Image (cartoon, rainbow, N blue to C red):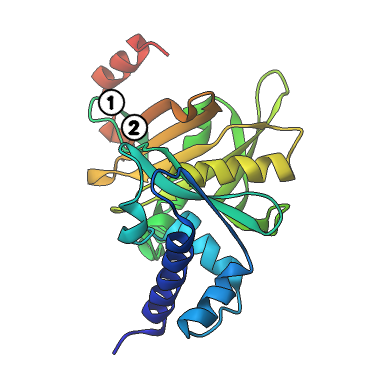
Amino acid sequence: MPTMKKKKKDRYARIIERIFLDRYTPGSTEVVFKREDINQTAAKLRVALISNVGDAIYSFRYRTELPETIRSKAPKGKVWIIRSAGPSRYQFVAVREVKIAPSKMMAETKVPDATPGIIAMYALTDEQALLAKVRYNRLIDVFTGVTCYSLQNHLRTTGPDKTQMETDELYIGVDKRGAHYVFPVQAKGGNDKMGVIQIEQDIAICKGKFPGLICRPIGAQFMKNDVIALYEFEDGEAGITISSEKHYRLVPADGITAEDLRTYLTRTQ
């Protein structure tokens, strides 16, 4: 028997699929719809109305892959994402496909593992374990060169158009000049993939909540053998790009050799 969670997911997929296909024309790169279209479409499909419309939209923006019938309509080399288009308005937009995945050519850096053993024992999910390891080993500080402090994890807020937005963890930092930073962190464990839309919404959160701080969005990804990949992103003319990437392996203190340290001394920035 299907679970309630699967039923809800299937209902969301049927609704978003109908909304897209009713408005799409061949060759389109943008398809606009309204918040109210969600339950109007549910009524047409004769499925239960959605009490939390924001959750349905949030699901496809940040958590769930769009149905294949939608993905197949994307122009070559592009993928569909859902963006805000103003108060209670959204649009499917075909954007350049960007695969955020760890580089296979990146060298590793060993860091003494400071994760408390009891935390490692009871972390419930890959994402939770990853966030804990990043936090207790001060990997954001190491990666960015800025002294950072975790302000809040799983910050959920709404944008000006009432769209729900969430970031996995938020750090505040200060550098040697006294400049202040905000680092929103997206964490992915296992086979989960990081998406451009998640980085875009992290930037939007920072602009809304911390307009006076320098926003530097970060991605954290578990790799094989518990290596942690960290990325820093920037938003420029080409859209979201990776400006920096490093791979860290947490090891016992005696796992770092004199040869390792000599190697690190000769590395360029």
Q: Residue at horizontal 44%, vertical 68%?
A: 18
Rendered view: 245 above or below 83? above
Asked whether 226 or 2 is in front, the reply is 2
Q: How crowded is mark 2: few (under 14 residues within 10 Å), some or many (20 or more)?
A: many
Q: Residue at horizontal 55%, vertical 68%?
A: 55
Q: Where is residue 230 in the image (x, y as percent from the top left)?
A: 41, 35
Q: Between 209 and 34, which is closer to the camera in this rendering?
A: 34
Badge 1 crowding class, 10 Å Cα cut-off, few under 14, some 14 to 19, many 20 or more, is: few
Which mark, residue 54?
Answer: none
Q: Are marks 2 and 1 in contact (CB under 8 Å)?
A: yes
* Residue 243 placement, left or right of 84: left
Determine the CA span between mark 2 and mark 1: 7 Å
Amino acid of disc 1:
Met
The residue tagged with tag 1: helix, strand or loop?
loop
Q: Name the residue under label 1.
A: 106
The furthest residue to the right: 212
Q: Mark 2 points at which residue?
A: 247
Q: Earlier in the sequence, mark 2 or mark 1?
A: 1
Q: Position of residue 156 (x, y in %)?
A: 62, 58
Q: Quadrant of residue 221?
A: top left
| Residue 100 sits above or below residue 128 on the image | above
